[in-house]
Amino acid sequence: MKSKLLQELRKHPNGIKLSGFDPSGDINLKINDLEKSGYVFEKKEDIICLVSSPDIPFPWEFPRFEPNFHYFKDVKSTMINARELAEKNAPHFTVVIAENQGSGRGRMDRTWVSSGGGLYFTILLRPDIPPALVFRINFIASLTLVKTFRSLLGVEAMVKWPNDILIHEKKLCGILSEMAIDEERIRHINLGIGINVNNDPAEREPKATSLKRVLGKSVSRVDILRRFLETFEENVRDIAGYRNIISEWKDYSITIGRNVKVVTIKDTYWGTAVDVDENGALILEKPDGTREAVIYGDCFLV
Ligand code: BTN
């Protein structure tokens, strides 16, 4: 396995013995393959060391998920590939990722600019929970993302209801989810996540930002994705028991206490966001003093 070889090479920066590593003898084939994918090695007699790795989310960079990890250079939208895989019974925690999306989709029928350098992926989930608890998945995902950005990169990422990630009030990351239910049973949930990493969406979307823009340098997409997938997978294992998800999420909320405009499919509301209830609905206090619980919509800070 390439992942095993890379793991060994990273553990031994001074190199490993070619002859000792792989008695089956196909190590040279693996090294050739990896070189073609952009990895650089230094070879001295029987010793080989890894000099550098490309920042490309190849499946072998995520050993825990590798068997169900689908990497593409170009797709229309990873949501389409993930739906096809779901229809073919792909298992829980199948990941579809692409370098570029020709027709990246956002929430409320918007497009998602998906130029090279970002992370665009969909995770297929088959959780054994009642449909009433599905909302927790988006909250777990956005909370895990915020914590990943904060712990790995030290940035002040915040969540904006329902599940956008912002830095300095500009959008860094968005989440789109699709669900298929059979009677009262969830068939699958496809969670699409777009993260502006080393791309520059601000050219086309002035209200967007990227990690590169915020930090003034490129960062490792592979490290971000690895940390996120590993923690997210652990967090979704116990969705039913994750009762304090909303209160944890609220610790990072930029929405509560702010004046907002919320656009739903049917209505537009103005008011102050006073809370997010235990079902994930935004509690709005309207100018006439009455309260409205909004389950789903687009929220703008005003
Ligand atoms: C939003 O509007 O905030 C949600 C954006 C979701 C974008 C991601 S990128 C990967 C996946 N594929 C898509 O076409 N959309 C989602």
Image (cartoon, helix red, strand yellow):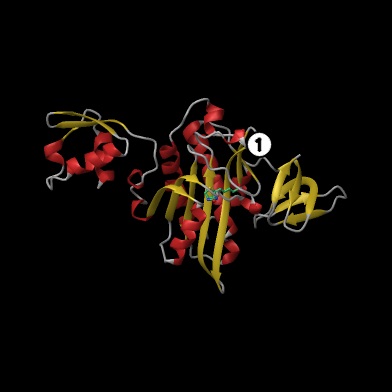
- The residue under the point 52% across, 54% down is 191
Task: Determine the residue located farthest toward the bottom in the rendered image.
Answer: 183
Q: Tell me if 127 is positioned left or right of 50 in this view.
A: right
Quarter location, residue 224: top left
Please state the horizontal and vertical placement of residue 26, each as a whole percent of the image.
Answer: 16, 45
Q: Quadrant of residue 42?
A: top left
Pointer 1 residue: 207
Which amino acid type is marked by label 1?
Lys
Residue 36, x across and y down, in percent: 28, 38
Residue in the picture at 52% in, 25% down = 216
The answer to whether residue 238 is visible is: no
Q: Nearer the viewer, residue 203 or 70?
A: 203
Query: In x, y percent, where is residue 145?
Result: 52, 43
Q: Nearer the viewer, residue 133 or 165?
A: 165
Q: Report whether residue 278 is seen.
A: yes
* Residue 201 position within the rendered picture, expressed as x and y whole percent measured from the top left: 58, 36
Placement of the C terminus among the 4 image quadrants: top right
User: Does mark 1's beta carbon lie closer than 8 Å to ligand 1?
Assistant: no
Tell me what residue is drawn at x 46 percent, y 31 percent.
Answer: 219
